[in-house]
Amino acid sequence: MTTLKTGDPAPLFTTVDQNGNQVTLENFRGKKVILYFYPKDDTPGCTAEACNLRDNYQQLLGQGYHIVGVSADPVKSHQKFAAKYSLPFPLIPDTEHTILNAYGVWGPKKFMGRSYEGIHRVTFVIDEKGIIERVITKVATGDHTRQILTQV
């Protein structure tokens, strides 16, 4: 699991989203970013999380937040997922695990007694200066916006 914590600089990255648009953390300087990592497109928990962020997108924008989702799914999977649920924010296909490893969210997991490597569902709230403001490791997928907006 991630070793990044509040007060750490957010690891920089430059990549493309599901539509081929360049996404770089540096371009978000002066803006707040919700960088959320999720295991797999179009699965129940990941869909609930994405749709919760979609449904509250205008509220989050109004409070100065920009949303970026990251998983190891390929471009075509992200395109279908974003289209199916009308997601208004970029999804990054990190098939090489570069960003996943930089943020420490790729690693050993267990499910039903089986161990495997995968993505831990973690959200990083990054401030205008590129500093991690909060790390949410226990994501409530259907109520994620409230978690983000509620200071713990």
Image: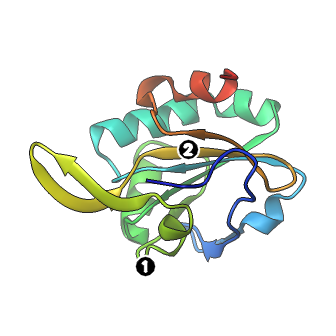
> Where does label 2 land, which residue?
123
Q: Residue at x 60, y 54 (%)?
A: 4
Question: Which residue is at a point 64% across and 48% down the rendered structure image?
Answer: 5
Picture residue at 20% right of the left edge, 49% below the top: 110
Residue 91 in the image: state x and y as whole percent: 53, 58
Residue at image coords 43%, 70%: 75
Tell whether 101 sits left or right of 146: left
Q: Secondary structure at mark 1?
A: loop
The type of residue carrying mark 2 is Thr
Residue density around tag 1, few if under 14, some if 14–19, many if 20 or more, within 10 Å: few
Instruction: Judge whether 79 appears above or below 65 on screen.
Output: below
Would residue 2 be found to the left or right of residue 15 on screen? Answer: left
Identify the disc placed on residue 96.
1
Label placed on residue 149: none
Q: Quadrant of the C terminus?
A: top right
**Coloration of the structure image:** rainbow
Let me know if residue 120 appears in the view.
yes
Query: Relative to 53, does residue 40 appear above or below in the rendering?
Result: below
Q: Secondary structure at mark 2?
A: strand
